[in-house]
Amino acid sequence: MKFPTVTGRDTAGRQLTLPADLDGEQTLLVLSFHQRQRSLVTSWRQFASELCDRFEHFAYYELVAVGSRHGMLPPSTVGGMSPTNARQHVHENTIVLSVDKQAFRRRLGVLGEETIYAFLLEDGRVVRQAAGVLTPSTGQALEALLEAYRDAKGRSNGSTSAGESSS
């Protein structure tokens, strides 16, 4: 499934178009719908940060989907918080999406807003998804996917150079 094209703002106020403006050949997006879910998102943060350090092709973002009227947020709010409070409550990789939440959920194939969702993207396509907090088995599966991607990329790069031997 292709990740829906949506616009959002990062913590510096820059407008981004997702998934085109995201870094990483493989990108993990952790999506929340309510401020009270920030602690659930935190369960992913340290692990994702460690993966970013280990895999140069990997990037991580936290998405906050807020409801919108005509797709616009008042300039003094970021997800229903003042800009000062927002900086204290969101991670530097947070992107706030002002979207029609029901339509956005439908396009992603998620049923409700009761929990958070994690999506692994490759070339703008969702290749894996999970609901809820990070579990050991989900973490191991994500790590295995990143390793397999890196290894396959390394093999394809090594085999394209004629006359070079891999050691």
Image: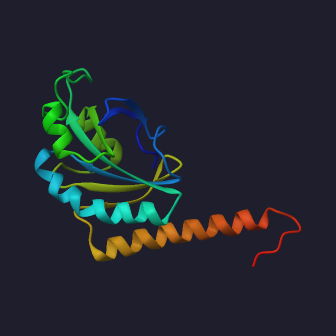
| Quadrant holding the C terminus | bottom right
Q: Is residue 88 left or right of residue 153?
A: left
Residue 65 vertical position relative to residue 75 in the rendered view, above or below: below
Q: Is residue 14 visible?
A: yes
Q: Is residue 114 visible?
A: no
Choose between 111 and 22: the one closer to the eye. Answer: 22
Q: Quadrant of residue 97?
A: top left
Residue 96 vertical position relative to residue 70 in the rendered view, above or below: below
- Residue 90 place in picture, x, y as percent: 22, 45
Q: Is residue 93 left or right of residue 20?
A: left
Q: Quadrant of residue 84?
A: top left
Q: Residue at x 16, y 24 (%)?
A: 76
- Residue 46 place in picture, x, y as percent: 30, 63
Residue 31 vertical position relative to residue 47 in the rendered view, above or below: above
Q: Residue at x 15, y 45 (%)?
A: 34
Choose between 121 and 102: the one closer to the eye. Answer: 121
- Residue 60 place in picture, x, y as percent: 39, 53
Q: How many marks?
A: 0
Residue 159 vertical position relative to residue 69 in the rendered view, above or below: below
Q: Residue at x 25, y 32 (%)?
A: 100
